[in-house]
């Protein structure tokens, strides 16, 4: 049985999430080797971007445990019978050996560095045959080389950007993630309500969100929507300012347009992202402890 295919996600976790050699951090190659042999989370964090480390530290105990189990993938491979070694003759960056498999060698084809950033082009070779390439970007922070991005050319879906705090989202409290998803859903609902209201009542400006609220009931039990009670959103969200699922929402009219913001009531307890929406149709977010703006990126 040979290494027919080693996915980027597997090798990324091995190279990008684990590590420890005596000379760790001196060069990009040594940083990758350090990561691939990591015995503990502290060693891993030496070679992850500071922004990602900050997010790991903010995880609750259960989330941190999940993160540590994931980033110590190399150690788990050793426990499962795959030996990860550094060859004495330095003919390869790393060698992976497992009983019944062809030995896999991770070799450095090219290395480019300006002293502050580096790019390593790697090849994966087993039984003398090429089984793929990887590109690894690193940046020097606080005297340590830290992996910022890994890419498998031709397989863009497997690219992993480590220099992104959102990478840690999958390890967080599921309830926290649910609150953020709920905030985005509420923004989309409000945006739909505002767009629909403008289509139905183009001559009426909307300065008060209560106009989107439930319509009155007629004598036959049906609704009678009008410009003051359009029946487009529920009573709780038909307000210029309200709280839902740990987020505070604020609607601000502006000329022919508007903006809506959603910010956690308690940063890192009810949410780690703030959101912004306007009549452009785009929702934007920030992981900083502030309100999101039109200048922030899409989530």
Image: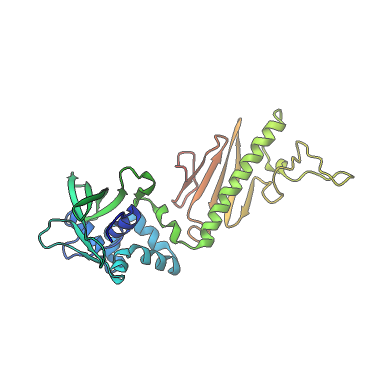
Residue 6: quarter of image: bottom left
Front-lying residue, 273 or 69 = 69
Task: Determine the residue located farthest toward the left in the rendered image.
Answer: 89
In the displayed structure image, the side of residue 266 where residue 1 appears, left or right: left
Q: Where does the image place residue 186, in percent across and percent down from the top left? A: 61, 48
- Which residue corresponds to the image point at 49% horizontal and 39% vertical from the top-left? 294
Q: Where does the image place residue 13, in percent across and percent down from the top left? A: 32, 58
In the displayed structure image, the side of residue 184 where residue 165 appears, left or right: left
Q: Can residue 25 be seen in this view?
A: no
Q: Where does the image place residue 198, in percent across and percent down from the top left? A: 67, 33
In the displayed structure image, the side of residue 68 where residue 1 appears, left or right: left
Front-lying residue, 67 or 131 = 131
Task: Determine the residue located farthest toward the bottom in the rendered image.
Answer: 79
Q: Where does the image place residue 98, in percent across and percent down from the top left? A: 25, 66
Whether 154 is drawn above or below 73: the answer is: above
Q: How many labels does the image show?
A: 0
């Amino acid at each position: 049985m040979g290494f027919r295919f080693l996915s980027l996600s597997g090798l990324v976790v091995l190279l990008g999430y684990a590590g420890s050699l005596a000379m760790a951090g001196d060069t990009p190659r040594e940083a990758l080797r350090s990561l691939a042999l990591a015995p503990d989370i502290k060693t891993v964090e030496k070679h992850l971007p500071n922004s990602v480390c900050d997010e790991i530290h903010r995880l609750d105990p259960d989330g941190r445990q999940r993160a540590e189990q994931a980033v110590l993938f190399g150690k788990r491979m050793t426990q499962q019978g795959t030996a990860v070694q550094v060859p004495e003759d330095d003919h390869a960056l790393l060698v992976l050996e497992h009983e019944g498999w062809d030995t896999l060698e991770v070799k450095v084809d090219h290395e480019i560095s300006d002293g502050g950033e580096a790019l390593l082009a790697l090849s994966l070779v087993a039984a003398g045959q090429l089984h793929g390439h990887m590109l690894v970007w690193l940046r020097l922070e606080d005297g340590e080389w830290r992996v910022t991005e890994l890419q498998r050319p031709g397989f863009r879906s497997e690219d992993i950007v480590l220099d992104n705090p959102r990478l840690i989202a999958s390890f967080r409290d599921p309830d926290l993630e649910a609150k953020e998803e709920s905030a985005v859903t509420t923004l989309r609902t409000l945006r739909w309500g505002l767009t629909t209201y403008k289509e139905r009542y183009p001559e009426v400006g909307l300065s008060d969100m209560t106009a989107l609220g439930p319509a009155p009931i007629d004598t036959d039990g049906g609704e009678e929507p009008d410009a003051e009670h359009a029946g487009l959103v529920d009573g709780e969200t038909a307000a210029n300012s309200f709280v839902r699922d740990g987020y505070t929402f604020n609607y601000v009219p502006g000329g022919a347009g508007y903006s809506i913001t959603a910010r956690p009531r308690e940063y890192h307890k009810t949410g780690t992202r703030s959101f912004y929406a306007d009549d452009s149709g785009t929702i934007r977010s920030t992981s900083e402890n502030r309100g999101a703006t039109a200048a922030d990126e899409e989530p």
